Amino acid sequence: MMRKVAITGWPVSHSRSPMIHGYWLKSLGVEGVYDRQAVAPEDADLFYRDFASSGLVGCNVTVPHKETALRACETLDDAARAIGAVNTLWLDGAGRLHGANTDAAGFLGSLDQSAPGWDEKPGAAVVLGAGGAARAIVWGLLQRGFKPVHIVNRTFEKAEKLASYFGSDSIAQKWEDLGDLLGKADILVNTTSLGMEGQPALDIDLSPLPDTAVVMDAVYVPLETGLLKQARARGNRTVDGLGMLLHQAVPGFEKWFGVRPDVTPELRALVVADL
Ligand code: ATR
């Protein structure tokens, strides 16, 4: 039987996952299908609870179902448990549903590939934003030994909530203290939507940042954000947001189809052409 997988969520029309997995299926010669499956909010609970009858062997989960899907899983990986959301599901031979969150792995995999050695001496990190992406990224940084991880967000209460969720190695900070924080940072990550096409620019001054620090922007439209331009101009290593999107897909493909795929320049070019 053809193994069938899909991106599930509401909506799913904008998702780039079919393109990524479609590329791997074809280039690796794997027999399988990766589709889109819209799941309306009122159907979500039943859909994931009764996943074994969906005809799929697994799926990706996108907004707004990442928590609903988590509740339907019999097991969760460490990341899903820590982050409180799943984006990757698979059925085992007995029809039991397992869940994982691969966003942190995607973030880490992207940095490992694009900025080798970036975590050799993990020190302080600064994360801008306190939403869903920040949650996965803060957890990933803590896993690699960065501390403290400073969380800076427009709505301070959300930064406080996220920081207290992960314990004393993550600290909520005020925007006005950003300059001081950057002065001691080994990595800066933007997880806000600032700098994204159609959004206001992310207007920060990187001059206090050590030139050895790595700057990562989770935004990938445009690929080259104002933040990354400024960082590159002053000699910092930079990593764009597309790598995270591509790398978060790797563990799912491996689970469903039994082959670990690579994030190749060819795959990057394919997705870039579609941005
Ligand atoms: P994601 O899943 O991509 O993280 P999200 O959960 O909606 O998306 O989070 C968006 C983040 O961008 C939040 O940290 C948000 O700040 P608030 O918590 O204050 O809302 C941040 N953000 C969005 N627009 C912003 C703006 N105009 N200025 C500053 N921060 C902004």
Image (spheres, helix red, strand yellow):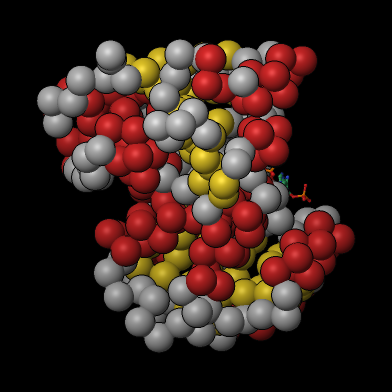
Nearest the viewer among 84 and 126 is 84
Against 67, residue 15 (above or below) is above
158 or 249, nearer to the observer: 249
**In the visual, does 264 lie left or right of 134?**
left
Q: Residue at x 70, y 19 (%)?
A: 46
Q: Is residue 176 above or below residue 129?
A: below
- Residue furthest to the right in view is 157
Residue lying at 24% horizontally and 44% vertically, measured from the top left: 260
Residue shown at the point (30%, 41%) measured from the top left:
254
Q: In front: 275, or 17?
A: 17
Is residue 146 something one can see in this rendering?
A: yes
Find residue 174 and report its image quarter: bottom right
Q: Is residue 269 left or right of residue 241?
A: left
Specify whether residue 10 is in view.
no
Residue sitting nearer the eye, 158 or 256: 256
Q: Position of residue 16 (x, y in %)?
A: 42, 26
